[in-house]
Every structure is written in structure tokens, then in C-alpha cells.
Amino acid sequence: MMTLDKFEEATEAVKKVINRTDLVYSEYFSEQSGNKVYLKPENMQYTGAYKVRGAYYKISTLTKEERERGLVTASAGNHAQGVAYAAKLYQAKAIIVMPSTTPLIKVNRTKSYGAEVILYGNVYDEACQYALQLSEEKGYTFIHPFNDEVVATGQGTIAMEIFKELPTVDIILAPVGGGGLLAGVATLAKMLNPNVQVIGVEPAGADCMKASLKAGSVVTLPKIDTIADGTAVKTPGDVIFPYIQKYVDDIITVEDTELIVNFLDIIENHKMVVENSGLLTVAALKHLKCKGKKVVSILSGGNMDIITVSSVVQHGLIQRGRVFTVSVLLPDRPGELVNVASIIAKHQGNVIRLDHNQFVSINRNSAVELTITMETFGHEHKKEIVQALTDHGYNPKITMPSKLY
């Protein structure tokens, strides 16, 4: 059972392995949401995510014999690093099964702590089945990433820190995949203040917890589809599910497109890299119906590979109207390119890519296709430039940029 004594014990235990992640007041998100928003930056942990809390606390409670048998777990990445790091501190062998789709940075970081990594399956659930199989066959001690009361207690230490810094918190937003973090945080939060609201946030493409709460029992989704790989879980934990039923006030789901634009917001306003699952609680701020409340958004992790970062930034810029591509047909005569460039320059558009094709037509009055990718200040600025091109007799067509830089 998750008890106050166990939460206090876990809080002392995890101090040995965690960085202090003091709350960060966000003027930007406070203004955007109408609430007083504080960020709990667990992306700043040594392993890049909160998961080290539950992993270390769980391993600390094992017997010497259980540790010496070797540890095995399954994870999309963050729990993997937590177990690998904790196992290294206890000089225990660790075998980590990760989905084959796991970002490279999470695989390499897990290996860097001395763990053996096995890539298996396309989603967490498939990797977990194989890890359980290894546990039975080899006798390894299995460390579940979320469906374990001890692990959830370790994750719940986040709530203890939140209340110490902000005793008058009104709402805590926690990402949810399998439910370990949400169960731990909600249980302790309600023990400390029954009036605080605890809301889980999960991707719309992997809303197993919302579906389970609606059904009244744990259900398995037929498929999942989300860029939030850390919360891409088909089946929530049945052990921790009763805690969520009892203590969680609501579940909010957000679309992947919301995560993309919030990635830009976090980088530009707080200079932090937060992975897609960690951004769930930030994206949820706009879904809150209240105003003037003290809200804590838990940023669960920041482990993103550079390729993913590049892709998210590009799509975010496009969604925000900060980058767009427009094509126009020009007469094949000197000076037309300069005319178009001067219109764009006059309206402060910044050209970052230009394609000039003279062979789209044999009609010399519209024989040149000019495709321009440019930076703008947003959607209104984009409309202004397109309208200016239209006013000068061009017929601009907006397309998706094939490449930015």
C-alpha cells in the first residue's frame, strides 16, 4: 500500500540520486492560460526524467539476493535509464528491453550506465511481454515501470516537493502513460490536501487511462498512434488503477499538434528541451476551465534525439506561421525576380530558400515558377505578404515547405 510513511521514506531515499527541480514560475504560460502556472522541471534530472525516483526507490527496497539475480525491465526510455543508473549504483546487472522505435539518445544513454539493451517489439507493451519472459526464464528480478506500488511511491515524491515549495497549490497536472506517476502524485497529494485537484494528461492517440476510467476497469487499446513515445501505452497498470480511480479528478487528452507548438514555447520562453510526453501538461493548460488558480505542470522528461528535435521544430514553425512556402508564376523577362523580392523585403519577410524553375511552361508570360520559403512573425504577417503579392498582380499559392534550411 502507498502510505504517508512510505512516501516520507521514499522522499529521503531518492535525495541520493535526484537533482533539485525547484518550481519555475512561468509568466508566459500564466498569461496564456489565465492561471498562475509553475513548472516542475523533471527534465533536469541527471537521467533526463523523473523515472529515476521510482526505479531507485524500488531497487533500494529489494533484498541483496533479489539484486544479485540481475534486474530486468521494459521501457520506452526514461524508466530504462532510471533502472540502469540505479542498478549501476548498486553494482547490479541490468537488462533493459526497449521498443525498436525508441529514440537513439535513450538507447545510448541507457547503455552508458552499463545496462544491456535489447530492442524488441514496436510498442512498450510488446517489449514488456518479452521482459517478463526473460524474468521467468533467467530468474531476473522484474522492475515494472509503472504497475508497482513501490515504484509509484517513488514517483509520488514529486508531490512532496511541490507541497513544500507551494503549499497552496490548487491543481497538479501530471502526464499519464501507464499511470505510475499519476497514481503516486495523486495519492500523496490527496493525503496532504484533499482539496487539491490532480489531473492526468495523456495523448489522444494513446488514451488508455481515459478509456479505462470510462469503462470502470483496465482496458487495452487496439492500437496507439502518438509522437509522445514516453506515454505510448496500450494498457494501464491494474495494480495502480484503483488509486487513480479514487484520487484523480479528471483526465485531459491532447493532440500531437498541440505538443509540437508547445515545444517551441518552452524553448523560446524557458530555454528548456522537454520531450513530447513531458509537454502534455503544458498543452493541457489551455483545456482548463478555471482562472486564477495556482497550477503546477510536471515536465516529466527531456530525452529527445536531435533528429526528433529538428522535426518538431520544423513542424512547429510551420504550424505557428513562422515559416511558409509560396509559389508564383512569373513572365520570363529580366527584373521579375527582383520585383518579387522587393515586395517581400518591403513587408519584412526573410527569404531562407529560393527555387527558380524556367521550364514549367512554354508560355513566356508565365514560364517561370518561383518557389520561396520565408520566415515571418506569424500567421497575420504571412497573410500580409501573400496579400501584397496578390495586389501586385501575382497569384501566390501557399504550399508546405519541402526543406527549411
Image (cartoon, grey):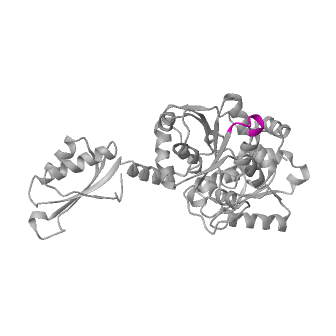
Viewed as shown, does residue 31 lie left or right of 102?
A: left
Magenta stretch contains residue 192: yes
Counting from the top left corner in percent of width and height, residue 39 is at 59, 36
Q: Is residue 44 visible?
A: yes
The one of 20 and 161 positioned closer to us in this rendering: 161
Q: Which residues are magenta?
A: 190-196
Viewed as shown, does residue 400 lie left or right of 207?
A: left
The one of 324 and 109 positioned closer to us in this rendering: 324
**Height in image: 328 above or below 248?**
below
The structure residue drawn at horizontal position 83% and vertical position 60%, both measured from the top left corner, is 140
Image quadrant where residue 184 sits: top right
Image quadrant where residue 139 sits: bottom right
Magenta stretch contains residue 358: no
Counting from the top left corner in percent of width and height, residue 262 is at 49, 45
- Residue at the far bottom in the pictured view: 362
Q: How many marks?
A: 0
Counting from the top left corner in percent of width and height, residue 83 is at 74, 50
Q: Is residue 89 visible?
A: no
**Height in image: 314 above or below 40?**
below
Counting from the top left corner in percent of width and height, residue 112 is at 67, 50
